[in-house]
Image (cartoon, coloured by chain):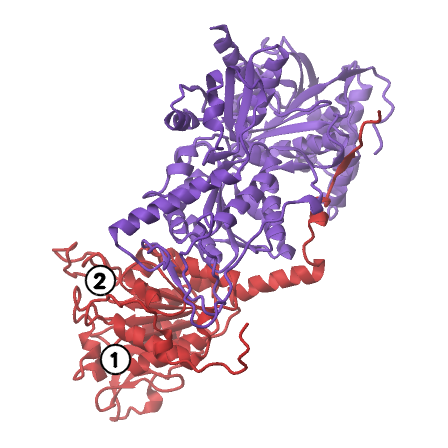
Chain colours: A purple, B red
Amino acid sequence: MSTTTNSKKPIKELDAATVRFCGDSGDGMQLAGTQLTNTSALIGNDIATFPDFPAEIRAPRGTRAGVSGFQIHFASREIFTPGDSVDALVAMNPAALVTNLSDLVDGGILIVNKDSFTEKEFKLAAIDANPLEDGSISGFQVFEVEMTKLTRLAVAETGLSGRDADRCRNFFAMGLVFWLYNRPLDPTLRFIESKFSSKPDVAEANRSALHAGYNYGETTEAFHSHFRVDKATLQPGQYRNMMGNQALAWGLVTASVQSGCDLFYGTYPITPASDILHELSRHKSFGVRTFQAEDEIAAVTATIGAAFAGSMGVTASSGPGIALKGEAMGLAVMTELPMIVVNVQRGGPSTGLPTKTEQADLFQAIFGRNGECPMPVIAARSPADCFDVAIEAWRIATQFMIPVMVLTDGYIANGSEPWKLPNVADLPKINVKYANALQNGDEFQPYARDEYLARPWAVPGTPGLMHRIGGLEKQHITGNVSYDPLNHQKMTDIRAQKIANVAQTIPAQEVNGVEQGKVLLLSWGGTFGSCNTATNRLKEQGASVAHAHLRHLYPFPSNLGELLKQYDTVLIPELNNGQLRTLIRSEFLVDAQGLNKVQGKPFAVSEIVEAVEEILAN
Amino acid sequence: MSSDTSLPVLKSTDFASDQDVRWCPGCGDYSILAQMKKVLPQIGVPREDTVFVSGIGCSSRFPYYMNTYGIHSIHGRAPAVATGVKCARPELFVWVITGDGDALSIGGNHLMHAIRRNLDINIVLFNNQIYGLTKGQYSPTSPLGKITKSTPFGSVDNPVYPLSVAIGCEATFVARSIDVHIKHLGETLKRAAEHKGTAFVEVYQNCNVFNDGAFNYATDRNTKQDTVIEIEHGKPLIFGKDRNKGIRLNGMDPEIVELGKGISEDDLLFHDEKAPEPSLAYLLSRMRYPEFPEPIGVFRAVERPVYDERMDNQIADAIEKRGKGDLEALFTSGETWKVEAESA
């Protein structure tokens, strides 16, 4: 890989930097962020990203509602979050500036597109005065760049003008940021080449804008120096940048291969889960069958049908869609078929905040069905972890003949991090056994059970195993319809015991930090990065703190109750009003404390550090 | 698995499960069950390759009584469950058993989409114009003004006609029969089974407890020849005890005419189940008693590619063009980078 051109300006070493691009929804900020991400990953930084965009595809131009942002944290050390605050902010218009400025560190770098700071834009952004002149940006290193004008000049030779030329502005901004952090242009040039291969003039214009932005940094007097963030010391191996939804899809494909069991994915489009469908629909050569159903209920019931027919049935949605699937999940529990239900959580209730993150569907996952209807629940902790969690869900579902709920959230679904490619030969095998045809005379018992209490998976097409299942209560062993009171008690107990048995097959809960001490941070899902980083920071300060991050939420790991007793205080940070805390208190009678927030945003590391410090101080 | 070289010849009783049938004595469902068990051996698909899927309602208990694979799912969702079964395993022979409430009320959406996708499944809708299992509320096919437990002053809902709905959803096979018209019912089920694509069959079914006699006009020995018209492909629409009445088109509308008196068979409407456009089938589906005799038989039977086969073909194509999926190739696709071990 070629490094950057020979810069004449001094370079300062940094161990990490956080950059945010923000602008109008149509300004191409997600693309700019993605390119900086991929480039940083390719030169060996550790990375974590946080795309933040409005629910509307194109909210009114220039307004605050239409602001779209993409934050990336890149570092020469291991990092787990996209950063609490921003070291460099690129704001393409006044609305983006005023809505994002509070996240910029004091003295941070602020790059604005000066051409968009006009009276008309101020009005659209609902601001009275020019923020470039009213003192609100005085505490930052401000670079007012005439990006519109410079981009138009740069692309003039390609014949593009007006709006077409202005569409290249994000490449100018990228070029400038690439210069600022000493990033190579090659990966983005390759991207332009493949993305715009059918539009050579657009490709050429984007290339020109990218170079113009880069050269602007190098040649103008405004920028005196730039930065370098060296490679991170990651574990040796082959890496790629991985987003959560993609990792989940790949995990499912992998589990399909490793279990020799076909994947049927039935779903209905919903933010922020749709990318799983987009990804899986590309992998037909793995035999993946994707079905875009007419609604959420059809998605899950078709999945049940596929599971009955011998495929692994997977469906995914977000909270509102999961609510619609509730009755069908009960059917899957009753019929004891292997399935995975994925909830990519978003802000709720109702339609809530479709593009913002939250982890308030834990109660729904564990309790959200009629009757005594237990399902194992597991949660991914980071974008790349979605891969492992998908495989684990598949393992549990097939080993126990049960639907499994997987929780992720918008933050990890759309976020990305480097993923070390697993060695295919080392991937775990998943042992799936279908019931075999019986000898003549033997009677098939669809609700007979093995040592885990799993019933046989007898699929249509197998002679002699014809049987009927359904939502009515089943007689123990025979599976015939039964209204017998004691049988219902027995079957309810069996279904509960079966889920409890899952705990025997999961690893003991581990902690990062002291084994006994003052504070235990207990977390689950997408808050892992913030909690882990906070713990490491507190440990460096010598604090008596440990962190336990739960993957298995139902059932809990067997040692969890004992573990919780080793600490004076258990603090549970959650992006909800205390759902895990309620479960922990109820299950273990531990006076766990909560740190709770529902703002559609992840925790800042500092919020967690401060909460722990406050406990330690008292 | 079996070393037998010849297929065993199955009888109707081989398709009966060991479960007691629990419909009310005298229910029309018994007759439909009997015809199904009689027809399946003639079709010759092994029991283990046959799957019955149902939703909720009296009719939806049907799978429990068949010695095949079966799933009694949740209210209205049988077409979606069947879609999953069929997509996962296109070689299976899949039947959906549903009722007027199950299919047209709570499950209307799934019915519509299964039909328009043209999955290779058979949907049999038992239409008794009432909710039976919940003990007698009006259904989407109950006539306007129907007095039931939930409509003591008469229903103010307009009914839908199942076949009109199916045709509107681009159905490739649409037929109607009557529970007690057993020979016709058996033939109709057989035609449905032989159709490639979604076969939709409405069966007039008497609920002798909550809606007894709803179809008396069509089943009464004395009137049925005047109130029902058996349609057959390529034949003129003739009915009546003396087979002296027919249906003629007057512009876009059907009208009843008497044969003789200058009107011959050639003037009548001839049925064409293979008509590419569904207009004729739709017109027939709108003919209602008492203005018209109600048609029974196959309204429409056309060929169109089926969903599950197309899905299968896409997978086969992908494997042929790119080879069977390979995890190593997947993981290393696109941009990757290598982190070297730190030199000591």
Which x, y percent locates residue A388? 60, 39
Say which label, 1 or 2, has the lower sequence index.
2
Q: Chain of mark 1?
A: B
SS assignment at label 1: strand
Q: Is residue B307 above or below residue A420?
A: below
Which x, y percent locates residue B166? 38, 66
Residue B228: mark in rendering: 1
Amino acid beneath label 2: Ile
In the shown orientation, is residue A589 left or right of residue B127?
right
Res. A196 in view:
no
Q: Chain of mark 2?
A: B
Please give the name of the residue rendered at 52% of the width and 38% of the height, measured from the top-left corner: A272
Instruction: Identify the residue position indicated by label 2 in the image.
Output: B130
Q: Is residue B326 above or below residue A367?
A: below
Amino acid beneath label 1: Val
For label 2, the crowd category at 10 Å Cα-Cα, with few meaning under 14, some 14 to 19 and many 20 or more, is many
Residue A209: mark in rendering: none
SS assignment at label 2: loop
Number of numbered tags placed on the structure image: 2
Q: Nearer the viewer, residue B129 or A441?
A: A441
In the shown orientation, is residue A29 left or right of residue A299?
right
